[in-house]
Image (spheres, rainbow, N blue to C red):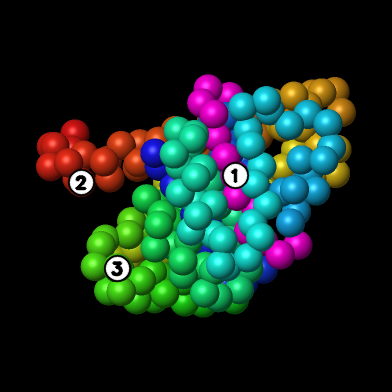
Amino acid sequence: MPTIAFANSKGGSGKTTSALLLACALAETKPTTIIDADPRHPISTWADMPGKPPALTILKNASERTILDEIEEAAARDPFVVIDLEGTASRLMSYAISQADLVIIPLKEQQQDAVAALDVIQEIHRDMKATRRKIPYVTLFTQSKAAVKSRTARHISSQFRDNPAIDCFTCEIHERDAFAAVFSIGGTVATMDPAKVNGLSKALANIEDFKNEVIHKLRAIRKVETGEAVA
């Protein structure tokens, strides 16, 4: 079953938010496990509040020594496994990346995030050499403006989107009140009251676009691995 790791060696990149949004969206139709491997355990804290989807299992990572077993057990049980990795380069990150079917590298349109994303890409290539297997990865811009972008944001975005060696999501995770509210009130964006949260319909559409593009990429990866023609 697909294992999706969210990795960026810089904190504050939108990694945990995008991982949780995807896991909740996947859990609407399929049992999903999210492995909380961030030492701060923000997703485990969220799960203690009411509103966690019944098909979503939260597994708090114990240590780098247990991560491989945790991934294997979750993948044997549920159709989807999402891993929220710590915001620093580590052996745990390397272990998780080595088992991933897809690594998503979230980053804001800022220079520090861009540098950290490139560091993760280099780490993935080292893991590919070590494991002798291709590890698909894709960058995801987060906390971006849905409308007008600054010159700096456009410049950083183009550095990734115009690079033929780097795959990028077409969609972006925009800066939305609903995405921040998830961690303060619990539950999911889909269960929020539109009278209390601004721009809820646009936030839901953003999540749906993200989920659909992830599924499309996973299917394309599967076709390449099995030798099928990719449409």
Does label 2 or label 1 sit earlier along the sequence? 1
Residue 19, x across and y down, in percent: 59, 48
- Which residue is disc 2 drawn over? 225
Quadrant location of the C terminus in the rendered image: top left
- Give the amino acid at mark 1: Ile
Q: In the image, is residue 37 part of the stretch drawn in magenta?
A: yes
101 lies above or below 2:
below
User: Is 202 or 46 nearer to us in this picture?
Assistant: 46
* 196 relative position to 151: left or right: right
- Give the amino acid at mark 3: Thr
Residue under the image location 78 percent in, 29 percent down: 51
Q: In the image, is residue 176 part of the stretch drawn in magenta?
A: no
Q: Which residues are magenta?
A: 28-40
Does label 2 or label 3 sit earlier along the sequence? 3
Alpha-carbon span between mark 2 and mark 1: 24 Å
- Which residue is disc 3 drawn over? 131
Residue 208, x across and y down, in percent: 53, 31
Alpha-carbon span between mark 2 and mark 3: 16 Å
Q: Which mark is residue 34?
A: 1
User: Is 228 or 199 nearer to us in this picture?
Assistant: 228
140 lies above or below 226:
below
Snapshot quadrant of residue 63:
bottom right
